[in-house]
Amino acid sequence: MKNHTLLIDGNSIGYAAQQATKLISGGMETQAAFGMIRELRSLRQVHPEYTPFVLWDGRAQWRFDLYPPYKGSRNSTPEQVAMKESYKRQRPYIARLLRHLGVRQLTVTSAEADDMGGYFAKLLSSAPGSKVGLITGDEDWMQLVRAATATSGEVWWKDPRSDGKFTNHKNFYDKTGCRTPFAFLETKILMGDGSDEITGVGGIGEKGAPEFIAEFGSVREFWRRCDAGEFVPRLKAHKRLYEGICPLDIDQWMTNYPGDPADAKALKKYKDSWPGQGRLIYKRNFQLMQLLKVPAPAKADVQLDAGKFDKEAFAEVCQELAFASILKNLDEFTNTFLQK
Protein backbone atom coordinates (compact mmCIF):
# COMPACT_ATOMS: atom_id res chain seq x y z
CA MET A 1 0.00 0.00 0.00
CA LYS A 2 1.29 3.45 -0.91
CA ASN A 3 2.03 5.91 1.86
CA HIS A 4 -0.77 8.40 1.12
CA THR A 5 -2.62 10.37 3.82
CA LEU A 6 -5.62 12.67 4.06
CA LEU A 7 -5.12 15.31 6.75
CA ILE A 8 -8.66 16.37 7.63
CA ASP A 9 -9.44 19.60 9.48
CA GLY A 10 -12.07 18.19 11.84
CA ASN A 11 -13.74 21.40 12.97
CA SER A 12 -13.74 22.89 9.48
CA ILE A 13 -15.65 19.90 8.12
CA GLY A 14 -17.78 19.57 11.26
CA TYR A 15 -18.89 23.20 11.34
CA ALA A 16 -19.74 23.07 7.65
CA ALA A 17 -21.97 20.05 8.34
CA GLN A 18 -23.53 21.86 11.30
CA GLN A 19 -24.90 24.49 8.92
CA ALA A 20 -26.82 21.92 6.86
CA THR A 21 -30.52 21.17 7.29
CA LYS A 22 -31.26 20.51 10.95
CA LEU A 23 -31.62 16.95 12.18
CA ILE A 24 -32.95 16.33 15.69
CA SER A 25 -32.68 13.26 17.90
CA GLY A 26 -33.62 13.26 21.58
CA GLY A 27 -33.83 17.04 21.57
CA MET A 28 -30.28 17.40 20.23
CA GLU A 29 -29.23 18.60 16.80
CA THR A 30 -27.31 15.87 14.97
CA GLN A 31 -26.63 17.24 11.49
CA ALA A 32 -22.93 17.90 12.23
CA ALA A 33 -22.37 14.27 13.25
CA PHE A 34 -24.38 12.94 10.32
CA GLY A 35 -22.68 15.18 7.78
CA MET A 36 -19.22 14.53 9.17
CA ILE A 37 -19.29 10.75 8.84
CA ARG A 38 -20.94 10.96 5.43
CA GLU A 39 -18.15 13.28 4.31
CA LEU A 40 -15.52 10.87 5.64
CA ARG A 41 -17.14 8.03 3.73
CA SER A 42 -17.22 10.11 0.56
CA LEU A 43 -13.53 10.92 0.98
CA ARG A 44 -12.73 7.23 1.41
CA GLN A 45 -14.68 6.44 -1.75
CA VAL A 46 -12.97 9.14 -3.82
CA HIS A 47 -9.50 8.54 -2.36
CA PRO A 48 -9.42 4.83 -1.40
CA GLU A 49 -5.62 4.71 -1.52
CA TYR A 50 -5.34 7.42 1.18
CA THR A 51 -5.52 6.86 4.95
CA PRO A 52 -7.73 9.45 6.68
CA PHE A 53 -6.34 11.28 9.71
CA VAL A 54 -8.65 13.76 11.48
CA LEU A 55 -7.01 16.70 13.26
CA TRP A 56 -8.91 18.53 16.00
CA ASP A 57 -8.19 21.97 17.40
CA GLY A 58 -6.51 22.50 20.72
CA ARG A 59 -5.84 26.01 22.01
CA ALA A 60 -2.72 27.74 20.76
CA GLN A 61 -2.48 30.11 23.71
CA TRP A 62 0.70 31.66 22.35
CA ARG A 63 -1.32 33.23 19.51
CA PHE A 64 -3.67 34.95 21.98
CA ASP A 65 -0.67 36.10 24.02
CA LEU A 66 1.03 37.49 20.92
CA TYR A 67 -2.14 39.13 19.60
CA PRO A 68 -5.05 39.40 22.11
CA PRO A 69 -7.73 40.29 19.49
CA TYR A 70 -7.11 36.94 17.75
CA LYS A 71 -10.48 35.34 16.86
CA GLY A 72 -12.10 37.83 19.22
CA SER A 73 -15.50 38.16 17.56
CA ARG A 74 -16.23 34.57 16.58
CA ASN A 75 -18.88 34.23 19.27
CA SER A 76 -20.20 37.76 19.21
CA THR A 77 -23.83 37.03 18.24
CA PRO A 78 -26.48 34.82 19.87
CA GLU A 79 -26.66 32.79 16.65
CA GLN A 80 -22.93 32.08 16.69
CA VAL A 81 -23.05 31.09 20.35
CA ALA A 82 -26.03 28.77 19.75
CA MET A 83 -24.35 27.10 16.78
CA LYS A 84 -21.14 26.57 18.72
CA GLU A 85 -22.97 25.05 21.68
CA SER A 86 -24.97 22.73 19.43
CA TYR A 87 -21.82 21.59 17.66
CA LYS A 88 -19.99 21.15 20.96
CA ARG A 89 -22.71 18.72 22.16
CA GLN A 90 -22.20 16.60 19.05
CA ARG A 91 -18.40 16.45 19.19
CA PRO A 92 -18.20 13.42 21.53
CA TYR A 93 -20.58 11.52 19.24
CA ILE A 94 -18.50 12.44 16.19
CA ALA A 95 -15.39 11.18 17.95
CA ARG A 96 -17.10 7.88 18.84
CA LEU A 97 -18.42 7.37 15.31
CA LEU A 98 -15.00 7.97 13.79
CA ARG A 99 -13.31 5.76 16.38
CA HIS A 100 -15.60 2.83 15.58
CA LEU A 101 -14.95 3.31 11.86
CA GLY A 102 -11.24 2.90 12.58
CA VAL A 103 -10.36 6.52 11.74
CA ARG A 104 -7.36 7.99 13.54
CA GLN A 105 -7.96 11.25 15.39
CA LEU A 106 -5.43 13.62 16.91
CA THR A 107 -5.73 16.59 19.26
CA VAL A 108 -2.71 18.55 20.43
CA THR A 109 -3.92 20.60 23.38
CA SER A 110 -1.43 23.43 22.72
CA ALA A 111 -1.94 23.70 18.95
CA GLU A 112 -4.63 24.25 16.34
CA ALA A 113 -5.45 21.76 13.62
CA ASP A 114 -3.77 24.19 11.20
CA ASP A 115 -0.48 23.80 13.06
CA MET A 116 -0.65 20.03 13.00
CA GLY A 117 -1.64 20.16 9.34
CA GLY A 118 1.61 22.01 8.71
CA TYR A 119 3.67 19.65 10.84
CA PHE A 120 2.26 16.43 9.41
CA ALA A 121 2.11 17.65 5.81
CA LYS A 122 5.88 18.10 5.92
CA LEU A 123 6.52 14.90 7.86
CA LEU A 124 4.26 12.59 5.85
CA SER A 125 5.33 13.95 2.45
CA SER A 126 9.03 13.51 3.21
CA ALA A 127 9.18 10.09 1.53
CA PRO A 128 9.50 9.91 -2.28
CA GLY A 129 6.24 8.82 -3.90
CA SER A 130 4.07 9.81 -0.94
CA LYS A 131 1.01 12.01 -1.29
CA VAL A 132 -0.76 14.15 1.30
CA GLY A 133 -4.22 15.61 0.76
CA LEU A 134 -5.29 18.58 2.89
CA ILE A 135 -9.05 18.47 3.46
CA THR A 136 -10.33 21.77 4.83
CA GLY A 137 -12.27 24.90 4.01
CA ASP A 138 -9.40 26.97 5.41
CA GLU A 139 -7.46 28.42 2.49
CA ASP A 140 -4.47 29.19 4.74
CA TRP A 141 -3.54 25.52 4.36
CA MET A 142 -2.79 26.15 0.67
CA GLN A 143 0.61 27.52 1.70
CA LEU A 144 1.51 23.85 2.26
CA VAL A 145 0.87 22.72 -1.34
CA ARG A 146 3.96 21.13 -2.87
CA ALA A 147 5.02 19.31 -6.03
CA ALA A 148 6.61 15.90 -5.77
CA THR A 149 10.40 15.81 -6.11
CA ALA A 150 13.01 13.09 -6.28
CA THR A 151 13.31 13.17 -2.49
CA SER A 152 9.79 14.05 -1.29
CA GLY A 153 6.13 13.60 -2.07
CA GLU A 154 3.22 15.75 -3.22
CA VAL A 155 0.86 17.87 -1.10
CA TRP A 156 -2.49 19.07 -2.44
CA TRP A 157 -5.47 20.96 -0.96
CA LYS A 158 -9.22 20.46 -1.30
CA ASP A 159 -12.34 22.08 0.13
CA PRO A 160 -14.89 19.24 0.14
CA ARG A 161 -17.75 21.73 0.25
CA SER A 162 -17.05 22.64 -3.38
CA ASP A 163 -15.91 20.30 -6.14
CA GLY A 164 -14.17 23.18 -7.89
CA LYS A 165 -11.93 24.01 -4.95
CA PHE A 166 -9.00 21.72 -5.56
CA THR A 167 -5.47 23.11 -5.66
CA ASN A 168 -2.18 21.41 -6.43
CA HIS A 169 1.16 22.62 -7.78
CA LYS A 170 -0.10 22.44 -11.38
CA ASN A 171 -3.08 24.78 -11.01
CA PHE A 172 -1.75 26.82 -8.09
CA TYR A 173 -1.37 30.08 -10.00
CA ASP A 174 -4.78 29.75 -11.68
CA LYS A 175 -6.47 29.13 -8.33
CA THR A 176 -4.61 31.66 -6.18
CA GLY A 177 -3.04 34.24 -8.50
CA CYS A 178 0.28 33.56 -6.77
CA ARG A 179 3.32 31.97 -8.34
CA THR A 180 4.38 29.98 -5.28
CA PRO A 181 2.88 28.83 -1.97
CA PHE A 182 5.25 31.19 -0.14
CA ALA A 183 4.05 34.10 -2.27
CA PHE A 184 0.49 33.07 -1.34
CA LEU A 185 1.43 33.10 2.35
CA GLU A 186 3.01 36.54 2.12
CA THR A 187 0.00 37.89 0.25
CA LYS A 188 -2.25 36.66 3.07
CA ILE A 189 0.12 38.15 5.66
CA LEU A 190 -0.04 41.57 4.01
CA MET A 191 -3.83 41.38 3.64
CA GLY A 192 -4.56 40.05 7.12
CA ASP A 193 -7.34 37.60 7.90
CA GLY A 194 -10.74 39.00 8.82
CA SER A 195 -12.08 35.61 9.94
CA ASP A 196 -9.37 35.43 12.61
CA GLU A 197 -9.45 39.17 13.39
CA ILE A 198 -5.87 39.58 12.15
CA THR A 199 -5.30 43.07 10.77
CA GLY A 200 -3.31 43.55 7.60
CA VAL A 201 -0.25 45.66 6.95
CA GLY A 202 -1.77 49.13 6.80
CA GLY A 203 -2.26 50.80 3.45
CA ILE A 204 -1.55 47.80 1.23
CA GLY A 205 -4.98 46.14 1.27
CA GLU A 206 -6.56 43.19 -0.52
CA LYS A 207 -5.92 44.59 -3.99
CA GLY A 208 -2.48 45.94 -3.25
CA ALA A 209 -1.06 42.80 -1.60
CA PRO A 210 -1.06 40.58 -4.73
CA GLU A 211 0.28 43.49 -6.79
CA PHE A 212 3.06 44.10 -4.26
CA ILE A 213 4.19 40.46 -4.27
CA ALA A 214 3.96 40.32 -8.07
CA GLU A 215 6.23 43.38 -8.30
CA PHE A 216 8.83 42.50 -5.68
CA GLY A 217 8.58 38.73 -5.45
CA SER A 218 8.72 38.76 -1.67
CA VAL A 219 8.80 41.14 1.26
CA ARG A 220 12.40 40.17 1.96
CA GLU A 221 13.35 41.17 -1.58
CA PHE A 222 11.52 44.50 -1.10
CA TRP A 223 13.54 45.16 2.05
CA ARG A 224 16.75 44.17 0.26
CA ARG A 225 16.10 46.59 -2.59
CA CYS A 226 15.34 49.37 -0.14
CA ASP A 227 18.49 48.63 1.87
CA ALA A 228 20.58 48.65 -1.33
CA GLY A 229 19.06 51.89 -2.57
CA GLU A 230 17.62 50.13 -5.62
CA PHE A 231 14.10 51.16 -4.62
CA VAL A 232 13.15 54.33 -2.76
CA PRO A 233 9.76 53.92 -1.07
CA ARG A 234 7.55 56.95 -1.60
CA LEU A 235 4.08 55.61 -0.90
CA LYS A 236 3.12 55.67 2.79
CA ALA A 237 2.32 51.96 2.73
CA HIS A 238 5.77 51.16 1.34
CA LYS A 239 7.53 53.46 3.78
CA ARG A 240 5.69 51.91 6.72
CA LEU A 241 6.44 48.37 5.61
CA TYR A 242 10.13 49.30 5.33
CA GLU A 243 10.54 51.61 8.35
CA GLY A 244 7.48 50.80 10.43
CA ILE A 245 8.73 49.63 13.80
CA CYS A 246 7.06 52.32 15.91
CA PRO A 247 5.96 50.97 19.31
CA LEU A 248 3.05 53.43 19.30
CA ASP A 249 -0.07 53.00 17.21
CA ILE A 250 -1.50 56.05 15.48
CA ASP A 251 -3.83 56.98 18.35
CA GLN A 252 -0.99 56.81 20.88
CA TRP A 253 1.21 58.80 18.50
CA MET A 254 -1.37 61.58 18.21
CA THR A 255 -1.82 61.71 21.98
CA ASN A 256 1.81 62.84 22.18
CA TYR A 257 1.33 65.76 19.77
CA PRO A 258 3.31 68.64 21.29
CA GLY A 259 1.79 71.53 19.35
CA ASP A 260 -1.44 73.48 19.23
CA PRO A 261 -4.36 71.20 18.28
CA ALA A 262 -5.98 74.14 16.54
CA ASP A 263 -3.08 74.36 14.07
CA ALA A 264 -4.51 71.96 11.45
CA LYS A 265 -1.47 72.16 9.17
CA ALA A 266 0.98 71.31 11.94
CA LEU A 267 -1.32 68.61 13.25
CA LYS A 268 -1.48 66.95 9.83
CA LYS A 269 2.30 67.19 9.42
CA TYR A 270 2.78 65.50 12.78
CA LYS A 271 0.28 62.76 11.90
CA ASP A 272 2.01 62.15 8.56
CA SER A 273 5.34 61.82 10.38
CA TRP A 274 4.14 58.65 12.13
CA PRO A 275 6.57 55.95 10.91
CA GLY A 276 3.91 53.27 11.20
CA GLN A 277 4.06 49.66 12.32
CA GLY A 278 4.10 47.91 8.96
CA ARG A 279 7.28 45.93 9.51
CA LEU A 280 6.19 44.93 13.00
CA ILE A 281 2.75 43.87 11.75
CA TYR A 282 4.29 41.81 8.95
CA LYS A 283 6.53 39.97 11.42
CA ARG A 284 3.61 39.44 13.82
CA ASN A 285 1.35 38.13 11.05
CA PHE A 286 4.09 35.82 9.82
CA GLN A 287 4.27 34.25 13.28
CA LEU A 288 0.48 33.94 13.48
CA MET A 289 -0.17 32.61 9.99
CA GLN A 290 2.76 30.55 8.77
CA LEU A 291 2.37 26.75 8.87
CA LEU A 292 5.62 25.90 7.10
CA LYS A 293 7.90 25.43 10.10
CA VAL A 294 5.77 24.06 12.91
CA PRO A 295 7.79 22.31 15.63
CA ALA A 296 6.99 18.81 16.81
CA PRO A 297 4.32 18.86 19.55
CA ALA A 298 5.27 18.08 23.13
CA LYS A 299 4.38 14.46 23.93
CA ALA A 300 2.42 15.56 26.99
CA ASP A 301 0.10 17.61 24.76
CA VAL A 302 -0.67 14.83 22.29
CA GLN A 303 -3.99 13.01 22.51
CA LEU A 304 -4.17 10.28 19.87
CA ASP A 305 -7.20 8.08 19.28
CA ALA A 306 -5.95 5.35 16.96
CA GLY A 307 -9.45 4.04 16.27
CA LYS A 308 -10.56 0.44 15.91
CA PHE A 309 -13.13 -0.71 13.40
CA ASP A 310 -16.19 -2.04 15.23
CA LYS A 311 -19.34 -2.22 13.14
CA GLU A 312 -21.61 -3.14 16.05
CA ALA A 313 -20.37 -0.27 18.24
CA PHE A 314 -20.75 2.11 15.30
CA ALA A 315 -24.32 0.91 14.77
CA GLU A 316 -25.13 1.52 18.43
CA VAL A 317 -24.11 5.18 18.15
CA CYS A 318 -26.11 5.50 14.93
CA GLN A 319 -29.14 4.12 16.77
CA GLU A 320 -28.66 6.68 19.55
CA LEU A 321 -28.66 9.43 16.94
CA ALA A 322 -31.46 7.92 14.82
CA PHE A 323 -29.38 7.70 11.64
CA ALA A 324 -31.90 5.41 9.98
CA SER A 325 -30.54 5.82 6.43
CA ILE A 326 -27.10 4.62 7.53
CA LEU A 327 -28.48 1.74 9.59
CA LYS A 328 -30.56 0.62 6.63
CA ASN A 329 -27.40 0.12 4.56
CA LEU A 330 -24.95 -0.49 7.38
CA ASP A 331 -22.72 -3.01 5.61
CA GLU A 332 -22.48 -0.92 2.47
CA PHE A 333 -21.64 2.20 4.50
CA THR A 334 -19.05 0.64 6.80
CA ASN A 335 -17.32 -1.57 4.22
CA THR A 336 -15.86 1.57 2.68
CA PHE A 337 -13.69 1.97 5.76
CA LEU A 338 -12.33 -1.57 5.48
CA GLN A 339 -10.65 -0.86 2.15
CA LYS A 340 -6.88 -1.22 2.16
Image (cartoon, helix red, strand yellow):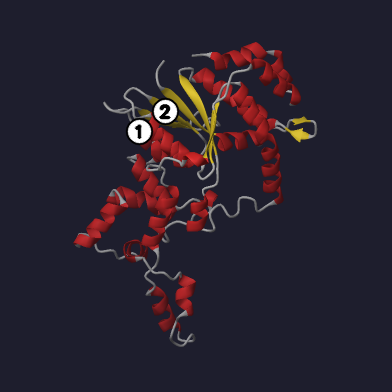
Query: Which residue is drawn at the image coordinates 42% and 38% (left, top)?
Result: 118
Q: From this viewpoint, which residue is outermost toward the right?
A: 26
Task: Examine the image and state in which quarter residue 21 appears.
Answer: top right
Query: Which residue is drawn at the image coordinates 46% and 21% (left, top)?
Result: 50
Circle 2 packing at 10 Å, graded few (<14), some (14-19), many (20+), is many
Residue 32 left/right relative to 44:
right
SS at mark 2? strand
Depth check: give the residue in front, 169 or 43. Answer: 43
Question: Does 267 appear above or below 9?
Answer: below
Question: Does 40 appear above or below 279?
Answer: above
Residue 69 left/right relative to 208:
right
Question: Does 83 appear above or below 53?
Answer: below
- Residue 199 is labelled as none
Q: Nearer the viewer, mark 2 or mark 1?
A: 2
SS at mark 1? loop
Q: Are marks 2 and 1 in contact (CB under 8 Å)?
A: no
Q: Amino acid at mark 2?
A: Val
Q: Amino acid at mark 1?
A: Arg
How many numbered discs sit on the rendered protein?
2
Query: Which residue is drawn at the image coordinates 51% and 35% (left, top)?
Result: 136
**Residue identified by numbered label 1:** 146
Q: Quadrant of the N terminus?
A: top left
- Residue 132 is labelled as 2
Circle 1 packing at 10 Å, graded few (<14), some (14-19), many (20+), is many
Q: From this viewpoint, which residue is outermost toward the top?
A: 331
Image spot of residue 218 (x, y percent): 30, 50
Image spot of residue 254 (x, y percent): 46, 77
Q: Earlier in the sequence, mark 2 or mark 1?
A: 2
Image spot of residue 144 (x, y percent): 39, 37
